[in-house]
Amino acid sequence: MNGPADPTDDGFEEQRPEGPPRIPGPRGAADDLDPRHAPDPLPEPSPQPPSGAPRTLPQAPSEPQPPRTHAVLKSLLGAWALAACSAEETQAVEDHLTECAPCAEEALRLRDAVGLLHPEESLDLKPLLRSRVLEDCLGKRPARIPVPAWATPYDTETARLDALLRDFGDSEWQTPVRLKWFEEERRRTRRATVAGVIGHLLTVDGLIATALGLDDPLGPEAPPGATARTEHYWSSAAQPLTRQIREPWREQGHTLVRTVSFAGRGVGELAVDYGAFALPLGDAFLERAFECWVHAWDIAEAVDYPYDPPSGPHLNRMIDLAARLLPSALAHRRRAGLAAPPRGLVAAGAPGRTLHLEIEGAGGGSWDIALDSPAAKPSAEHTVARIALDGAEFCQLAAGHISPEEAAVGQHGDREAIRDVLFAAASLSRL
């Protein structure tokens, strides 16, 4: 029988497969292109603040702040002088100062007071900073291979001079420098440049290099003697010396210190031949430290730059060397007829006439100087004269920068002995 017609029947009979339902397979690339499989569009996302940004609530527009009163602005002057105001407060105070004369005067007074509380300091490093830092570091952890004590002043003074030269421009290396020394009862001068002075230090330091078996900066044909070496170096230069001289001088100084540090004990007894005289290596290093400081002072004076004396312990070593050389210098002047003859001859090691030298200030101390013979033994019981002199002034006298007549000394006793010793101190200088 035919039943009633199904209203949804479209005339086609659905074909159902027999058996259990099939599991659909994976979608292929063709399925993704079929518009019937396209996913529904996602809703448009609302804008979100960046990750981590604080969420803020809408705020009503802020109302303008009322202008600050005179009393409020005046109370801010102290903070303004100390630069402790906000940008808005600073602008308000400075606008007020253009309109209020009493507050402007008060602001100037406060700024001056702040300047007294915080004085301006030079941006240049202090010359002794390197040695102080090294001393502090070595005090906490000693060096595995320490620099000998007699070479430390040379290491320090070359470092100080190198720090002065570091920022010199090309024109400053050609700045005229007047070298001064004392010879035959009067002061001598020689004109050089900053570069020429460094060349002079390089050539004379080369005497220590040759004593240690290192290469001579002037080569194997270099003449003997400190002065002759310098004159040869200056005259043989193909062109005026420039800032290029700094590097070989600096490297030679480092090599000298490094060599004696690795050499160990006993190296200080080597002799360094200066031509007219010789010094043990330890004294030669002190002599080179002294000359480095003196010529650094010459350079600083030429470029109008302040330069401090060495530290007290180093200055004391330099003064001690000069005091130990005075008897020999006095005997040399006596042989040249420039000093009074000895009052009496004494046997080597026996006490003889003595001058007591008192050096005041940093690096100071006291020394007894034998007057009649370098081999005589100074004796307090045989003291015939006393001299008191400032340490820096004594060094200037020994460097030939001031004459014996210009040295402001405290004198007592034999005038002839005092004069002979002062002139002997000046005769220690040379080019």
Image: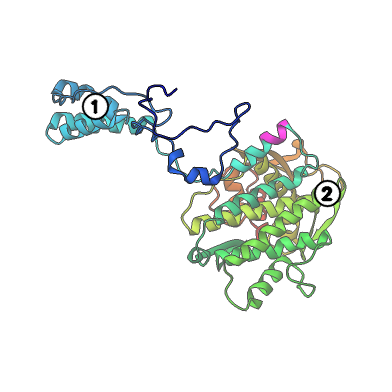
Q: SS at mark 1?
A: helix
Identify the residue at image location x=67%, y=61%.
Answer: 249
- Provide residue 92's location: percent of width, then percent of height: 19, 31
User: Which residue position holds label 2?
Assistant: 262
Q: Secondary structure at mark 2?
A: helix
Q: Residue at x 74, y 48 (%)?
A: 151
Asked if residue 221 can be seen in this view, the reply is yes
Quickly name the residue at label 1.
77
Q: Is residue 244 above or below residue 318?
A: below
Counting from the top left corner in percent of width and height, residue 234 is at 63, 73
Residue at 76% across, 44% down: 147
Numbered label tally: 2
Would you call the spot at circle 1 few (<14 residues within 10 Å), some (14-19), or many (20 or more)?
many
The image quadrant that residue 27 belongs to is top right
Q: Quadrant of the C terminus?
A: bottom right
Residue type of the residue flagged with mark 2? Phe
Q: Look at the image and give the residue range highlighted in magenta.
A: 136-140
Instruction: Point out the tag, 1 or 2, that comes first from the N-terminus.
Output: 1
Front-most of residues 372 and 18:
18
Indicate yes or no whether the magenta region holds residue 139: yes
The prevailing secondary structure element of the residues shown in magenta is: helix
Q: Quadrant of residue 241?
A: bottom right
The alpha-carbon separation of the residues under discs 1 and 2 comes to 63 Å
Q: Nearer the viewer, residue 44 or 249?
A: 44
